Image (tube, grey):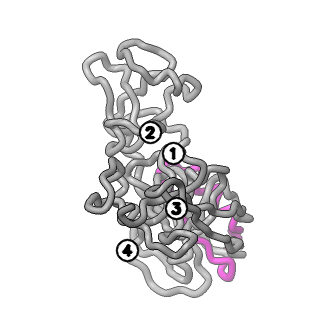
Amino acid sequence: MKSVFNFLFLQCVVVHSILWICIVEMQNATFRSLTFVHFPEADDREPLSGILHDRGNGVSLEGCGVLCLSSAQCFSFFHNPIQERCILTSIINVMSFRQTAGFSQFITNKCVHSKAGWEYIGNCRTTKYGLECQRWDQQNPHTHTYQSLGNQKNFCRNLANDKEEEAGPWCFTVDPGTRWQSCGIPLCYDFSRSCKKTANGVDYYGRTNVTKSGSPCNYWADTSQQNHTYTFLDDQFNYCRNPFGEYSDPWCYSGTS
């Protein structure tokens, strides 16, 4: 059975004269919502590339998810309830496929949905070059001012709006000669994630791009109408976002005043 997703109600309210808050009603997916996200754009498509394992007959949706979780290389899986078939893949955005009725793709939350990756709370603790991460609650070998992340062990994070925002989730390393590195968490853009799971919508990645009154949101890359420092959201087009959970709900800039 395919995962069932509820529709959501979207609205925006204005804060001051330039900042618009976008409120997204919280809903839950029925299948492993904490681990996988259904990617409806890939429905009825069978992957032809990046295949790690193709098992036919007798594999349930849940069983397919467990198989993906058991493989460190699996970032998405395709399941066909008609054929009871499970295909594990090592890539998120499958570009080579053929039409096969019944298939659905599910993307693991091991990936990030923006290049900044502020929503990532996974357990990766090594950099993309294989260096072990330094614990956030330690000042050796590298001193820092990220005491607020002391309860994050040595997991890769990007929870603060700072100069490392372009690198995505990162960490200080245990190598005295290398202060910090990006963790190389793979990107899996999925703008169909139209429900938020947190109160402030820091995890919202839907396509809402207008305010409650119908005013269009400015593109994050555009600073001609509003001078701001959120250009690192250029890969999020003009969709409402709440990077780093700085406000109470997803928001956007709109207009010039």
Residue 164: x and y, percent? 33, 37
- Name the residue that disc number 4 marks: 95
Q: Amino acid at mark 3?
A: Tyr
In the picture, residue 102 is in which quadrant? bottom right
- Name the residue that disc number 1 marks: 120
Does dot 2 land on a helix, a strand or a loop? loop
Above or below 94: residue 168: above
Category of crowding for the residue at label 2, using alpha-carbon neighbours closer than 10 angstroms: few (below 14), some (14–19), many (at least 20): many
Residue 248: x and y, percent? 60, 49
- Calculate the distance from the C-alpha at mark 2 to the C-alpha at mark 1: 7 Å
Q: Amino acid at mark 4?
A: Met
* Residue 66 belongs to magenta span: yes
Depth check, front residue: 60 or 15: 15
- Name the residue that disc number 3 marks: 205
- Name the residue that disc number 2 marks: 158
Mark closer to the chain start, 4 or 3: 4
